[in-house]
Image (cartoon, helix red, strand yellow):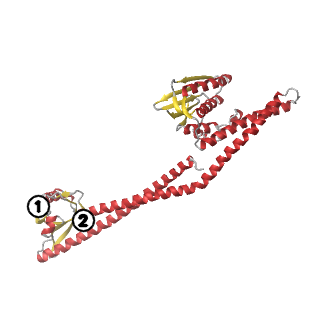
Amino acid sequence: MWNKLFEGLQWRMTCISAAIFGVLILVIVFVAYGFIWWNVLQHEKEELVDNIYHEAEEWVESGELPCSTISIREGSMLAYYVKTDGRTVILDQLGKGSLREGLLKHRSDWPQKLDTARMLDNRIYDNGGRAHRYLIAVAPVLREQQVEGHLYMFKDMEFYYQSAYMTLFKLLCVAALLFALACYFGYWLAGRNIEPISRMYARQMQFTADASHEMRTPLAVMALATQGLQEDEESHYSDFAKESISMLQSETKRMAKLTENLMALARSDEGIVTQQKRVDVTQLCQQVGAQLGLLAKEKGLVLQSEIQANLQLWGDEAALHRLLVIILDNAIKYSPADTSISFIASQSKSRLRIEVRDQGCGISDEDKEKVFDRFYRVDKARSRSQGGLGLGLSLALAIARQHHGEIKIFDNKPGGTIMRVLLPM
């Protein structure tokens, strides 16, 4: 039997594995992309510096200009030659218009150190509106073994950038496909891993439900038998026998209550909420408050109820009644005499808020989450003496979750506990 608990666990495992795999894919993609782009750029820088030496040598020997007319017109390759003073221009092959103005405007960004190259950070647009992104290199021009000046050459790298962006886009598309496959495989693998646990858990739930059901009849017979023994006035029992019969009756009641709670928890594990209908929560809270108010009075406690009128929600009335009884009974059990308990029910935005405030010993931060675990009791000796089974709050939380709600525990200043139930209305 597949349980919602394990279905949620499968999705959580899938999300965790998918997140890890997704981050790993992105890291690999961007590292690979960055490494490839860095190698391409380094190669282009070295090649451009070597090209400057070649063009400068040809220019000195034959007077051939570094850049052709076509490359200048297209803006693919440009040149600019100045003397060593940096001011006297010997050759200007930057073309005309906005392209030339843009390059000269960013003159301070050109490389200053000889035999180096760098990318110009800004895109520059020509008169036709086309974008250019230039790699600029500088090298010395030698004439008769003397440095005559510095030659700057500009290579348009826009095509490389566009190709790099397209490559990155394709890599991300492949990464997205791999991520989708990883999610599918992760979901399938999580299901395979959880399946044996799920079957074992289902068998455990079935055993709990069956055992609890089968125990009801013998427990009922035992309860009737012990009650008959206690009411038998003709038999003369010793004090030890009477005490034993009383103990049997008490433990039988406790076992019956435990069986009832186990059956309720088994139904809650299966996500079963019976008898769905519109519930008058105001009337239900007043009824429970009146019932447990007598129990509180017997213990010397004052139960103060503040129930807002016209509170309604859609749910299981019997389960909600059990929820209210559990949290109120819990407060009554662990509150010292001559203190008060506040029972509050109100609407908070679109949710029903039920609070039980006591002035008991409180619950430590460490135990606030553990108290919802089955059979967990903060003070085991005291809980057993109070008749506690360690299942009440587990069942209360299960009922709240069946109604898409939650239970929170807070400290009640200066002492005690606030048990807050929030249910969507």
Q: Is residue 60 visible?
A: yes
SS under mark 1: loop
* Residue at the (56%, 39%) spot, across then down: 402
Dot 2 or dot 1, earlier in sequence: 1
Q: Which mark is residue 229?
A: none
Q: Amino acid at mark 2?
A: Ala
Q: Amino acid at mark 1?
A: Lys
Mark 2, residues whose alpha carbon is within 10 Å: few (<14), some, or many (≥20)? many
How many numbered marks, from 0 up? 2
Q: Which mark is residue 96?
A: 1
Residue 408 at x, y = what percent?
A: 54, 36
Residue 208 at x, y = what percent?
A: 67, 45
Mark 1, residues whose alpha carbon is within 10 Å: few (<14), some, or many (≥20)? few
* Residue at the (30%, 67%) spot, across then down: 40
Q: Is residue 210 left or right of residue 153?
A: right
In the depicted structure, whether residue 96 falls above or below residue 389: below
Quarter location, residue 81 = bottom left
* Residue at the (13%, 77%) spot, across then down: 61
Judge by depth and name the residue closer to the eye, 293 or 70.
293
Q: Is residue 24 visible?
A: no
Give yes or no for contact between labels 2 and 1 (Cβ–Cβ under 8 Å).
no
Residue 133 at x, y = what percent?
A: 22, 60
SS under mark 2: strand
Judge by depth and name the residue closer to the eye, 108 or 287.
287
Quarter location, residue 315 = top right
Nearest to viewer (mark 2 / mark 1): 1
Q: Is residue 157 left or right of residue 418?
A: left
What's the CA distance linking mark 2 and mark 1? 23 Å
Query: Residue under circle 2?
Result: 117
Q: Is residue 51 left or right of residue 20?
A: left
Residue 22 at x, y = what percent?
A: 43, 56
